[in-house]
Image (cartoon, grey):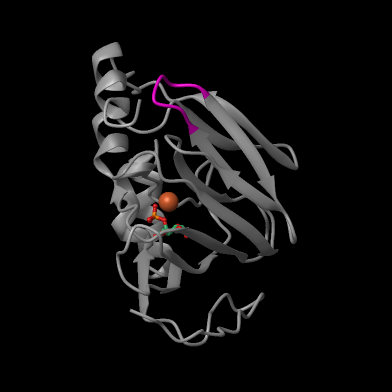
């Protein structure tokens, strides 16, 4: 079926996109299990009145394999104890599907983890294009003092699998504040995936 072309206008500061077909947002209280310090999380939810901490506006033309979903993510600045505000993170349900992120405003990191537990960090500032290759678990982190806004695009049939992070009790590393910047520390609850888990993730694609 022939589709009509679409133009969507991205607001690089407010983080929205005109013409979006979907929108979703997460409040701080939705994200308690992401952070090491549960008490600090509970206290901050009460202190701030449970704000929306990230919002996604996207355009989804359908779920055809050759098609493309795209949109904007806006993330608030902030920290739970030493940890910066972050997204839940996922691997694509069709794990060989990639993604690109394009920085619009603010200062962030993309934290990526391979199935066998290697961490990679890409720093995002305006005009940074980050390529998330197939098979990498990915999450965004706002390490700045202002909103972080990014544009993203990924194949329409990718899907998001959030369980992979739940099953390993988070990602291998946590990004914590360090002086004016950040550093990686070990997530002491992390349960590495077994060689069988890794093989199962890749088996449909090799
Ligand atoms: O899906 P989350 O891990 O909550 O992250 C929030 C959003 O981040 C990116 O923008 C992805 O491309 C979106 O598909 C995702 O929904
Ligand atoms: Fe993704």
Which residue extends farthest front?
A: 1
Magenta region: 113-118
| Looking at the image, residue 117 lies above or below residue 126 | above
- The residue lying at 24 percent from left, 31 percent from top is 167
- 116 in magenta: yes
Q: Position of residue 8 (x, y in %)?
A: 55, 83
Q: Position of residue 196 (x, y in %)?
A: 24, 15
- The residue lying at 27 percent from left, 31 percent from top is 204
- Give the quadrant of ligand 1: bottom left
**Quadrant housing the C terminus:** top left
**Quadrant housing the N terminus:** bottom left
| Looking at the image, residue 18 lies above or below residue 137 | below
Query: Which of the pair 69/67 is nearer the observer?
Result: 67
Q: Is residue 109 among the parts visible in the rendering? A: no
| Looking at the image, residue 106 lies above or below residue 193 | below
Q: Is residue 66 among the parts visible in the rendering? A: yes
Q: Position of residue 72 (x, y in %)?
A: 52, 69
Give the image quarter of residue 195.
Answer: top left
- The residue lying at 37 percent from left, 72 percent from top is 60
Query: Which of the pair 2/205 is nearer the observer?
Result: 2
- 166 in magenta: no
Predominant secondary structure in magenta? loop
- The residue lying at 36 percent from left, 43 percent from top is 34
Give the image quarter of residue 192.
Answer: top left
Q: Position of residue 146 (x, y in %)?
A: 66, 65
Q: 177 left or right of 29?
A: right
């Amino acid at each position: 079926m022939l589709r009509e072309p679409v133009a969507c206008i991205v607001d690089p500061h407010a983080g929205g996109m005109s013409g979006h077909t979907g929108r979703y947002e997460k409040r701080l209280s939705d994200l308690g299990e992401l952070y090491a310090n549960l008490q600090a999380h509970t206290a901050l939810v009460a202190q701030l009145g449970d704000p929306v901490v990230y919002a996604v506006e996207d355009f989804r033309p359908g779920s055809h394999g050759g098609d493309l979903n795209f949109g904007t993510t806006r993330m608030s600045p902030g920290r739970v104890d030493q940890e910066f505000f972050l997204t839940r993170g996922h691997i694509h349900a069709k794990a060989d599907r990639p993604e690109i992120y394009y920085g619009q405003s603010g200062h962030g990191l993309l934290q990526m983890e391979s199935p066998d537990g290697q961490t990679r960090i890409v720093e995002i500032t305006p005009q940074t294009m980050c390529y998330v290759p197939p098979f990498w678990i990915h999450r965004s982190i706002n390490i700045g003092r202002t909103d972080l806004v990014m544009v993203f695009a990924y194949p329409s049939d990718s899907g998001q699998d959030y369980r992979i992070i739940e099953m390993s009790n988070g990602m291998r590393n946590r990004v914590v504040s360090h002086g004016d910047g950040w550093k990686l520390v070990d997530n002491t609850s992390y349960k590495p995936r077994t060689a069988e888990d890794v093989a199962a993730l890749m088996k449909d694609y090799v």
